[in-house]
Amino acid sequence: MDSNTVNKVVKDALNHNQGKINSIYFTACGGSLVDLYVSKYFLEAEAKKVTTGWYTANEFVHVTPAKLGKDSIVFVCSHSGNTPETVEAAKVAQEHGAFTIGLTFNKQADLLTYSDAKIIYEWGNEAEVVNNPMAITLHATAKLLHGIEDYPYVDQFEDGFKKIDTVVANAIDQVQPRTKAFAQKYKDEEMFYVLGSGPSFGHAYGFAICSLMEMQWLNASAIHSGEYFHGPFEVTDKNTPYILIKSLGRTRALDERAQTFLEKYAEKIEIVDAKELGLDMIDDKVSEYFNPILFYTILCEYRSKLADVHNHSLDVRRYMGKVKY
Amino acid sequence: MDSNTVNKVVKDALNHNQGKINSIYFTACGGSLVDLYVSKYFLEAEAKKVTTGWYTANEFVHVTPAKLGKDSIVFVCSHSGNTPETVEAAKVAQEHGAFTIGLTFNKQADLLTYSDAKIIYEWGNEAEVVNNPMAITLHATAKLLHGIEDYPYVDQFEDGFKKIDTVVANAIDQVQPRTKAFAQKYKDEEMFYVLGSGPSFGHAYGFAICSLMEMQWLNASAIHSGEYFHGPFEVTDKNTPYILIKSLGRTRALDERAQTFLEKYAEKIEIVDAKELGLDMIDDKVSEYFNPILFYTILCEYRSKLADVHNHSLDVRRYMGKVKY
């Protein structure tokens, strides 16, 4: 993504409604919704005035927030750009007078019909992570918050976006042996719990629903590390596999507490640790928001190795795009 | 709960900070957090100005929203009243100048030390559902929104709270045969998906983590009905059991879509339908917000019958309150 494109989108959004913006919403479905989670989390954590919300598109369409209006910006993302409820969500946002930012991989997407700003992102192994929709949205959101209420750490964000591709590339090399070992060890498992917290909870959920359920037809359940001790931990035993994505940043203590418990009462545990994978190269004023960008790519390595041992291509579907629903 | 108590709490909250309130937050852990979900959903749907957030307590403590301040009200709930991270969350809220409303079953709770308003709720089979923490919080939140920005349907809410115990009592009778049949049919299942949407998604999650995981040591995964088609549905087959809690109200279309798909591709399906159970006795301006109050009690019937066939008491724990964590 040309950084001029993001700058132009941010500038246009900030000029909307004579510059009076009080809310930034995020809506999409499935994996695209997951990609928007960290931007919602960032605003909840950092914004002093701007409010936010994060909705699966069909709920946004049917139960549109009463606050949505001309003082809102709405990010709407769909990889194909034609997911009907996502296209409808963009239409609803526009009808309410909000400035809609549509993100898609498809230049001919229906989504773009209802997008005041259009972002066609890159995708695939050759694309840099800074150009994926999660990073673009986070980058734009940080700049928007700076523009609206002078959020102070945009320079640290800029620096982080310069470094993140190097961090991710190094981490991919680093995890090759362990992702292969993981796939061998867990190749016969039929159900996984995925734990994460803070900026990464979206990706704990995303790995469960997209990588495991959609792409490998495995059962999965995402649990917030902070919630684990308030019900979910009662199923913990030596036979149940857990994947814990351990964030760098303020919620790390929550992940560590889950890890300590798992190491005592479970045996099938895979820890994916952002700190060990080098995320601390990024300034600690902002590094926690980069966790999911790192985790997304690293978890792709995990799922790819699972696909290999299962001889089950990541692209095969039985329902999605094949039957009516 | 004496309605005067709720009125007094609402009055005191509305007088806080010279009546300038712009946000209402909800924080707790596990089942108590679930109880607060519908109030967050109500504010997101209905509030024109007031903003909201819903956080597991330890995340609220570690990543306190930058917006939290003297213009905030924070509901904090803990059944025992001594959950350390929940007590800490109330302390953090108070230190930020927010008006904290503590809800607990325990008159001696540590939580009350940090509560500007103290609500000791009723519990157990003899308690009326209007007096459980979910209903109290929803009732107070609706009144707060009325007080802050003149939310128009408080009378319909009052009427709903007068009717809900009758609706629930009738529904309990109605589901006796089917809950027994459910338990017999599914007694050997080891994993369930629980689907729900809108006001009820909190209880889909709650039934998964508290009733199934914590109380019956069964694997479970909660999926939003709107998200089901964007990944999760790929695991659907004739062997996997699904419980769909079907809401009355604006997100019913999302649940119906999931139901139609399940009826075609799955065989183990239990539908718990708020409309069939009589929730439409309540005015449709507000009835959707009563879904989880009905579902909570009805799902307690389901779990109780499961406990019977499993000969596994709902009160037995292996870790909670027994080991260090």
Image (spheres, coloured by chain):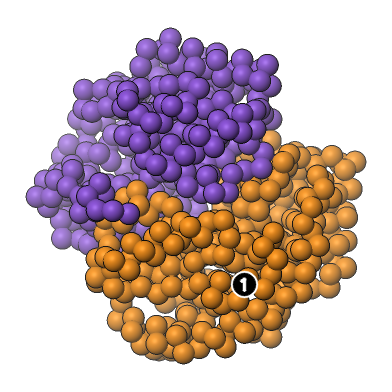
Chain colours: A purple, B orange
Identified at 69% across, 85% down, the residue is B126
Residue B103: x %, y % from top left: 72, 64
Residue B171 shows in the view: yes
Q: In this view, does B170 lie to the left or right of A36?
A: right
Residue A267: x %, y % from top left: 27, 61
> Which of A265/B63 is in front?
B63
> Which of B139/B246 is in front?
B246
Residue A271 shows in the view: no
Q: In this view, does A267 lie above or below B57?
A: below
Q: Is residue B189 left or right of residue A282?
A: left
Q: Is residue B167 above or below residue A85?
A: below
Q: Is residue B260 left or right of residue B12?
A: left
Residue A202: x %, y % from top left: 43, 43
Identified at 86% across, 46% down, the residue is B16
Q: What residue type is labelled 1?
A: Leu
Q: In which quarter of the image is the N terminus of chain B?
A: bottom right
Residue B194: x %, y % from top left: 42, 65
> Mark 1 — on which chain does it sit?
B
Identified at 71% across, 55% down, the residue is B75
Q: What element carries label 1?
A: helix
Identified at 24% across, 70% down, the residue is B238
Q: Which residue matches tag 1?
A: B279
